[in-house]
Image (spheres, rainbow, N blue to C red):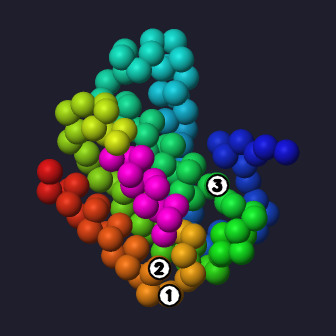
Amino acid sequence: PAIDPLESWSKYTSVIDKNRVERARAILRQGNDVAQMMKVVGEEGTSIDDFITYLKSEFIDAVYLQQDAFSEIDAASPVERQREMFEMMEKALLITYSFKQKDEARRFFQRLTQACIDWNMTTYESPEYTARKEALAKTLKEVTHV
């Protein structure tokens, strides 16, 4: 059955600090609110800041909450890998973006999402894993200097 990430909970101890998880959950909730608003007023009636919040929430869902159970690599992740992925995702979430157009923001988040998914499908601590992680860090660093 499908699990709503806004209502999900676990009896297991989190490997990520509670406050950091709560910040991500807050973005998920805000993004959900924007998604509901866009159903009424459309994307055109949404401010660029709200739209970026929506894109951030979609990013969290795609790169951290989704899991490919058919992938040997993604079916189970070591704790350290989960921490690294969360840290990279968190960096992307905390950036104040200065996109002028929604299409520009959408393209960036699509590219970032795919890069994170590709990174997540590489063998942990392999040369490819390290290279993809460094490329992601570079992408985030470049966008902070826009």
- The numbered disc on residue 126 is 1
Q: Nearer the viewer, residue 46 or 27?
A: 46
Residue 143 placement: quadrant? bottom left
- The numbered disc on residue 96 is none
In the structure shown, which secondary structural element does the residue marked by tag 1 occupy? loop
Q: Please name the residue shown 55% across and 83% down the image.
A: 124
Q: Please name the residue shown 65% across and 42% down the image.
A: 6
Tell me the distance, in whole angstroms, between the alpha carbons under discs 3 and 2.
19 Å
Tell me the distance, in whole angstroms, between the alpha carbons under discs 1 and 3.
22 Å
Query: Hey, which residue is sitting farthest top in the picture?
Result: 41
Q: Which is in the foreground here, disc 3 or disc 2?
A: 2
Q: Please name the residue shown 73% across and 54% down the image.
A: 9
Task: Kindly identify which residue carries mark 2.
Answer: 129
- The numbered disc on residue 66 is 3
Query: Hey, which residue is sitting farthest bottom in the picture?
Result: 126
> For the residue marked with disc 3, what is the amino acid?
Gln
Q: Determine whether, in the image, residue 116 is placed left or right of residue 145.
A: right
Q: Determine whether, in the image, residue 77 is placed left or right of residue 24.
A: right
Q: Earlier in the sequence, mark 1 or mark 3?
A: 3
In the structure shown, which secondary structural element does the residue marked by tag 2 occupy? helix
Q: Which residues are magenta?
A: 108-119
Instruction: Look at the picture and state if 48 lies above or below 45.
Output: below
Q: Position of residue 37 (x, y in %)?
A: 49, 19
Query: Local crowd at mark 3 within 10 Å, few (<14), some, or many (≥20)?
Result: few
- Our reading of the magenta stretch's main secondary structure is helix
Instruction: Tell whether position 13 is magenta.
Output: no
Tell me the distance, in whole angstroms, between the alpha carbons under discs 2 and 1.
5 Å
Query: Can you see residue 72?
Result: yes
- Asked if the residue under mark 1 is in contact with the one under mark 2, i.e. CB atoms within 8 Å, the reply is yes
